Amino acid sequence: MNALPLAFGAPMLLVGLITLPVIWWLLRMTPPPPQKEVFPPLKILAHVLRQEQTPNRSPWWMTLLRLLIAALVILALAEPVWNPRPVTLSGNGPVAIIVDNGWASAEAWEQRRETAERLIADAARAGAPIYLVGTAERANAQIGPFDAAGARERLQAMEPRPIPVDRKAAFERLAPALAPTPGARIAWLSDGILTGDAEDATKSLEKSGAASLLWYRPDTANLLGLTSVENGADALVVHAIRPMGAGGSRSATVAAFDNKGRRIGEASLAFSPGASVAEARIAAPIELRNDFSSLRIDGASQAAATRLLDDNTKRRRVALLSGAEADVAAAQPLLSPLYYISRALQPYADLIEPRTTDLAQAVPELLDQKPSVLVMADIGKLPQAAEERLADWVSRGGTLIRFAGPKLAGASSDDTLLPVTLRRGERALGGTLTWTAPQPLSAFAASGPFAGLATPKDVTVTRQVLAEPSPDLPEKTWASLADGTPLISGETRDRGRIVLFHVAPDAAWSNLPISGVFVEMLRRIIVLSRAGGGEKGSSAVSLPPYLILAADGSLKPPAPETKPLAVGGDGAPQVSYDNPPGFYGSDDALYALNLLGSKSELAPLIQPSLPFPVSATVYAADESISLRGPLFAAAAMLLALDTLLMLWLGGHLRLPRRKTAALGIMLLAGFFTAAAPFSGGHALAQVAPSAPDDAKPGDQAMISAVSATHLAYIVTGDKAVDDISKAGLEGLTQFLKEKTALEPGEPIGVDPARDELSFYPLIYWPIDANAPMPNETAIARVDAYMQGGGTVLFDTRDELAASAAPGGTTPSGQRLRAILDSMNVPPLEPVPSDHVLSKSFYIMPDFPGRYRGAPLWVEASLNGETRQDRPVRTGDGVSPILITANDLAGAWAIDSRGAPLLPTVPNDPMQRAYALRGGVNIMMYMLTGNYKSDQVHVPALLERLGN
Amino acid sequence: MAALGALAEPALTADALARARQRAALVPDLLVEARRVANTAISGWHGRRRRGIGENFWQFRPYNQGEALSRIDWRRSARDDHTYVRDREWEAAHTVWLWADPSASMRYKSNLGEVSKEWRSLIITLALAELLSRGGERIAFPGIADPFSARNGAERLATALSHAKTMPALPDVANVRRFSDIVLVSDFLHPLEEMLALLDRLAQRGAHAHLIEIADPAEEVFPYSGRTEFSDPETGERITAGRAENYAEEYRRLYLARRETLAHHCRRLGWSFTVNRTDRPASEALMRVHMHMSGPGAAA
C-alpha cells in the first residue's frame, strides 16, 4: 500500500493539520498568567530587569508542546491503524467460507476463527451475503446466506470437533446453494490434511459457478497422531504418525494417564528425519500398564494426539481348571497340576478357579466370569454340555490352553478342543526302556508367538503326547523339540485360540514348567488373548457414551447430541459427528473409540485445481493495531505535562524541600490508605461485618433455662396438678439450696410437645388420669429425651388408692402404662438397697412422698454384680426413668411463706423430711451419676497411694 | 498560590479621618508593645552619671558652708554629727528627633516577615519615645511634634501621629538643631541621591543621626520564582519577570550595595546604621540604637 504500514480510517481529518500554524499563532499570543507580587524595592529590580527583554510570550518549547498535543489529537481523530490488514476479498458477489473444523484444526482454531472473522468483515464491508460451512458439522447445519452479524454468530458457535472432516458432504451442500448467484468467492480454511473425499469434494465446486477460491493452507508439520497401541510383553508400544513429507527429526513425549487423569507413565517418541511413523515404548510393569486409560502426546492439544485404551489392552483374567481332586491342591500343593501355572501367571493375570470339581458346573461357572484365558490341566474328557459351551466360548474369542497329562493321553481321540489330533498314549524319552535321551527344545520359530524368546538349554522333555502327522502340523506347531515333534501347538478357531502344551503342567513329564521360559510362553499366549474372552456376541450392542474426547484431546462428559455407539455389528465402529471418539459403555466395560485407526496416515492436502482461479495463501494473524488509543493517551499525557509546566512557570510548584517531602509523605499515606482495603482488607473484613443478628424468638427463655440448673415438670393442663408440681419443685429447690451445694433456679413447667427438654436433668411428670393424653409427638420427644440422657420421674400419686384397689391398677397407673407403651422403656426394678440412688446424698431406706409404701422403680441394673465387700452396686449411667406413686411433689410442696402445702399421710413431719431427702438423693443421682458408687474405691486408692 | 507579599493595609486614600482612626486604633497596641520592648532596654539608661540637677538621688555629701540650707537633708544629718546634703544626679535634657517613614512601601509585609515594615517602624519609634521620655529626654517628630519633654511622651507622640495629616516622604529637618540626635526609621528605598542629600543636610546641621533600616525578608532574599509581575506600591509601576529566580542574584547584589552605600556613609559621619528585618525582634534594633545613643559618642 505504501512504504509505511500505516493507514487512516478517516484521512480527511488530516486536513486539520493545516490549522496547526493558526494554533501556533494563538498559542504565542497567550502566555501563562504571571504571579502578581507587590514589591517595594521595584526600582532596584527594574535596574536588574532593564538589561533583558521581558518575556511576555510562552517559551518556544511550550508552544511546541502544545502544537504537538494538537497534532496528536488531529492524528488520533483520523483513526490511524498500524499494519493495516489488506482486504482479502474484494468484489460484491456472495462470499462462502468453508472451515475445516475437524480435529486437525483444533490446535490453531483461534487462527481459523480470526481469519474467518476478517473475511466476514471484508464481506460485510462490501455488503455481500455470507455462507459459512463447517466440514465437521452436522449435515443439516445451516450454511446461510447470512448477513455479517449472523455469520459472526455462527462463527462463534462453530468449534473444532474431534472428528475427521467430511468435505464431500459439506461441499456438496454448498455448491447448489451458490449456483444461483454466480461470481461467488469461496474461501476454504482447510486443515491441510488430505481426506479420501477431498478430490470429489473440490470437484463438486465446479458446478457452483464460483469466481474464485482462496485456499488457506496451514502448517501441518506439528500435527501428530497416535494410531495404535500394542501391549507388548514388557512394554506398551505406541505407534504415532505425522504428516507425510514432514522433514527433519521430531521428538515428543507420550504420557500415559490412568482413569483418574493421573500421569503414570511416559516415553519419548522420536521421528527420524523423513519418517512419518514412529513408535514409543512405555516400559512399565504390567500392573501399571493395565491402569493406563489414555495416552497423550504432551503439548498436542488435539484429539488425534490422545489415544484411549479400553480393556483390550488390560490385564487378563485367567481361569484355571484341573482334573485333580480338590483336596490334592490343598494338602499337597506342589503336586497340584496347576501349581506351576498359577505361580507363573500370578504376576500377570487375575486367576480364578472353580468352587467345585464337578466339571459340568465348573466350566459354566468359570465362563460366566468372562475369563480371557482358560487353562485346563490334564483333562481328558469334558461333559458334553461343558464342551459345547467351551467350544462356543473359544469361537467367540476365548483362549483355551490345555496341558497334556495321563488323563489326556488316555482319552479318546475325538476331543474337538485340541489344535491337533493326538495319538493315544504318551511317548517316553530317556526312560529305562527307551533308547532316546530326554529331548531339549529346538529354537523358536521366528514368526511364531514365541519369536524372540531365548531357547533354553536346560529344558528337557522326558514324556510327551504326540500329534498325528497332518499337512498343517508344522503350521500349528509353535514350539518343538529338538527332534521336531511338537511341544506346543496352537490353532485359531474363529476369533479364539486353542493352545496345547504336549507336556504335563507339573514337573513330572519335563522340567519345562519349572523353567523361566515357561513363564514367558504363558505370558505371550495371554497377551495374545482377548480381554473378556468370548463375551461379545455377534449381535450389535449399543453402548451409551461415557466420556467423550474433546477437540483439545481432553476427556469430557458427553454432549447431549452424542449418540450411543453400535458395536459388534458389521465392521468396526466409525468416528462420526454422532459418535465422536471417546469411551462408550458403562463404567465396568468401556469401549474405546479412537480417532485414528492403525492404518491411518496423514497426507498433506494438495492444492485443488478448478476451472476458476485458485489462490493459495497461509493463515496470518491480524497484526493491525489501532493507534487511536495510544495517540489520545499520548496527547492526554502531554496535556498533563503542559499543566505541570504551566504551574511551574506560574511559580505554583515552588515547594520548599520539606514541604515536598511532607507532600510526598501525604501522597504515600494517601496511597496506603487507599490500598489498605486491598491488602489489610482481608483481616479487616473478618472483623468488620457485624455478626448477623440470628436471634430467634424464645432464645431468651433458652438462655435462662441453661444458665442455671432448673427442675422441670410436665404441664399436664390440669391447673391443680400443675400448681402442686410447681410448689413441690419449689419446695425441693429450696431444700436443695439449704442443704446442698446445688442451687437450682426457679422450677420450669414444660410442654413436651413444644419445649426443648434437653436443658433439664430431671423432669417430673405427675400422671393424672383426668388430664388429656399427651399426643404422639410429645411422647416421642420425651422418649428421645430419655434416650438422650435425660430422666423422667413419673409420679402416679395414687399410692393410697392403689393400696385400696384390689387389682392394683388405678386410672393413673393405666394412663402411665398407656404413655409408656409407646416408649422404649428399659426393664425396671424397685430401687435395691445397694443402689446408688439410696446413697447419693442421704442414706435412704425408701423414698416416701405424701404417701409411704410404694416403691421407686428404676432401670434394672441387670449386669451389676453384687459383692459383699462393696456397699454400692456398680454400673454406669443414670436410670432414664423413675416411677413412684408416693406423690413426691405433694410432700415437697410449700406455699409462698415456706410452710408445707399438703399434709403427709400419715401426718408425720419426719416423712416430709424423708421425702425431701429422697428428692435430694434423686437430684444428686441425676447430676453425679454413679460418682458415689465410685467413691467406694477411695479407701483402696488411698491405701495404694500411701504405699 | 497567594502572592508572597502584600500591603498590610489597603492603599492610602485621601480620607484623613479614616486613616487617623486606623492609626488611632493602632496606637494602643503599639504603645503596649512599645512599652514591653522598652522595658527590656530600660536598665542603665538613666542619667548622666554625675551630680547635677535632677530628680533622682545621686549621693550624700558633707554640707559646705555657703550652700543653701534648704539643700540639707535633715533626715540623713540627724543620724550623726555631720550635716549632709543630698546630691541629685545631673540629668541633662537632650532632644532626640524620631522619624518613622510614612511612605506606602512601608506597609509591605511578606509572609516571611512577622509584621509589616510600618508596624515595625512605629514600634521602634514609639519604643524609643517611651525610653527617651522616661529618661527625661525631649523628643520630637519632624513635621508633627516639636521637641517636648513629658513622662508620657510616647502617648503624646502617638496621639500626634494619629492626628497627623499626610506626611512628606522625607522628613523636614529644618528644626533639627546642633547636638540633637535624630533617629530615622525607614526602609530607605527612596532614591539614594535624595537620601544621601538628606543625611548630608543633617550632618551640616551638626545633628547626630541613627539610621534604622526596616527590611522585609522577601526584599532581602528575593524568594520569587517563575513568571512574576512585580508592582511598586508607591508608583503602581509594574514589571513582569519571565523567570524571576534568574534575577535573584543580581537583585540581591544591587539591594545590598544600596544598603552598603548608606551604611558606609553613616560610618563616615560617625553615625549608626542598623538593619532590622521584620522576621527578627524589634528589640534587637532598639538595643543597638540604645547602645549607640548611650555610648561614648552619644554624650558629645
Image (tube, coloured by chain):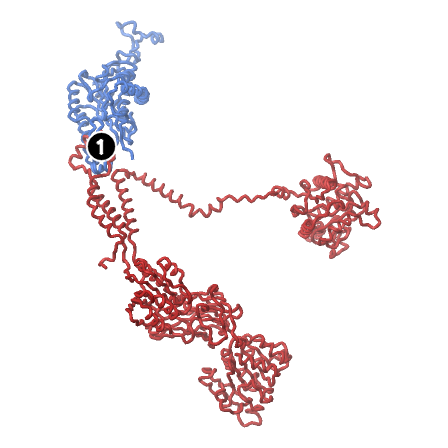
Chain colours: A red, B blue
Quadrant where the N terminus of chain A lies?
Answer: bottom left
Residue B219: quadrant of the picture: top left
Q: In this view, does B195 lie to the left or right of B2?
A: left
Q: Is residue A870 above or below residue A909?
A: below
Residues packed near mark 1 inside 10 Å, few (<14), some (14 to 19) or many (20 plus):
many
Residue B256: quadrant of the picture: top left
Residue B43 visible, this orientation:
no
Q: Is residue B245 left or right of residue A386?
A: left
Q: Position of residue A291 (x, y in %)?
A: 49, 70
Q: Which amino acid does label 1 sit on?
A: Phe
Q: Is residue B86 above or below residue B16?
A: above
Q: Tell which residue pokes out farthest to the front in this image.
A: A180
The residue labelled by disc 1 is B230
Q: Where is residue A487 in the image (x, y as percent from the top left)?
A: 52, 87
Q: Is residue A168 left or right of residue A560?
A: left
Q: Is residue A536 left or right of residue B159?
A: right
Q: Where is residue B92 in the image (x, y as percent from the top left)?
A: 24, 14
Residue A671: quadrant of the picture: top left
Q: Nearer the viewer, residue A166 or A584?
A: A166
Q: Mark 1 lies on which chain?
A: B
Residue A673 visible, this orientation:
yes
Q: Which of A569 and B18 is in front in this view?
A: A569
Dot 1 falls on a residue whose secondary structure is strand
Q: Which of A746 and A721 is in front in this view?
A: A721
Q: Position of residue A445 (x, y in %)?
A: 46, 85
Residue shown at 40% from the left, 73% from the top? A240
Q: How many marks?
A: 1
